[in-house]
Image (cartoon, grey):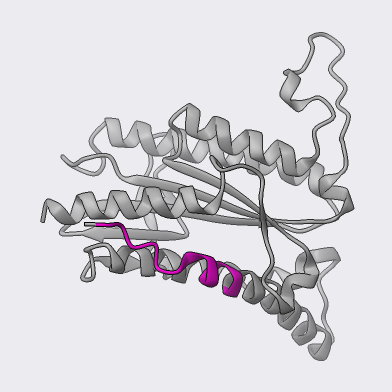
Amino acid sequence: MALDLADYETKARDAVMAFWGNREKARQKQIEAGKVDQGERAGVTGGKNMDGFVALVKDIVHANGLAHADIYQERRVLTLPGYFRPTKLWDLLVMNEGRLIAAFEFKSQVGPSFGNNFNNRTEEAIGTAHDLWTAFREGAFGEQTKPFVGWLMLLEDCPKSSAPVRDASPHFPVFAEFKNASYAQRYNVLCRKLMQEQLYTVASILTSPRAAVSSGDYAQLSDMTGLRTFVSELAGHVAAEASRT
């Protein structure tokens, strides 16, 4: 049976428009209330900015044989046991007959502070995955096949995220792929390595300018870290699970 990618390109554009639109609505709401967060935080505190991508994942799951899977997106039911910590809160979980089918992290980053945020996101992504797979190895989820673990980042496309960045490493040289790489390129390297090290089934980076609020335009940095790979791998994983039930 052919995989169903659920018209992902159209839905991704809708998700991007919703992302920028929700940020602006949150900012305007705070302005009207007379209490505005500093910097870009005013557009983040709405909490629903990546829901369009959540909806896309749900459509992929339903379209590829798991129409009756349990899909959790409410905070109170999004925790999984960890190994180095008691629990970890995820952004979306898919369960079927008591088995963990998939776990997702949806991230976004909007300027101007790309440097510290990139480092924080990197450390968080690595730690989260290592914790989950160690817990899996130790039987935290019972006897089951490996779940799909997805990481998706939407990064603002702007001069600060696309300009070359220099690093100071006085004792040893940095790896060549990071030299003068922009933050967008660094996220692409991160996603590629997260997959190569088998920390995530798929890790994807999309970039989009603020003007995409009316168009949903987004760009991908490589086929390996692009959205088609993300949805194709997810659809295949879901279809394999469906064939076992």
**Which of the 4 image quarters holds residue 163?**
top right
Q: Residue furthest left?
A: 245
Q: Position of residue 118 (x, y in %)?
A: 72, 42
186 in relation to 245, above or below: above
157 in relation to 67, above or below: above
The residue drawn where x is 86% and y is 26% is 167
**Which of the 4 image quarters holds residue 104?**
bottom left
The residue drawn where x is 76% and y is 66% is 41
Q: Position of residue 143 (x, y in %)?
A: 15, 39
Comparing 238 with 111, the one in front is: 238
Quadrant of the image containing the C terminus: bottom left
The residue drawn where x is 88% and y is 22% is 168
Q: Is residue 218 visible?
A: yes
Comparing 174 with 40, the one in front is: 174
Look at the image and give the residue range highlighted in magenta. Answer: 2-14
236 in relation to 55, above or below: above
Q: Position of residue 106 (x, y in %)?
A: 54, 57
The residue drawn where x is 70% and y is 75% is 215
* Residue 91 as seen in the image, left or right of residue 207: left
Q: Position of residue 230 (x, y in %)?
A: 46, 50
Comparing 89 with 206, the one in front is: 206
Comparing 53 with 140, the one in front is: 53
* Residue 124 as seen in the image, left or right of residue 79: right
* Residue 75 as seen in the image, left or right of residue 177: left
69 in relation to 124, above or below: below
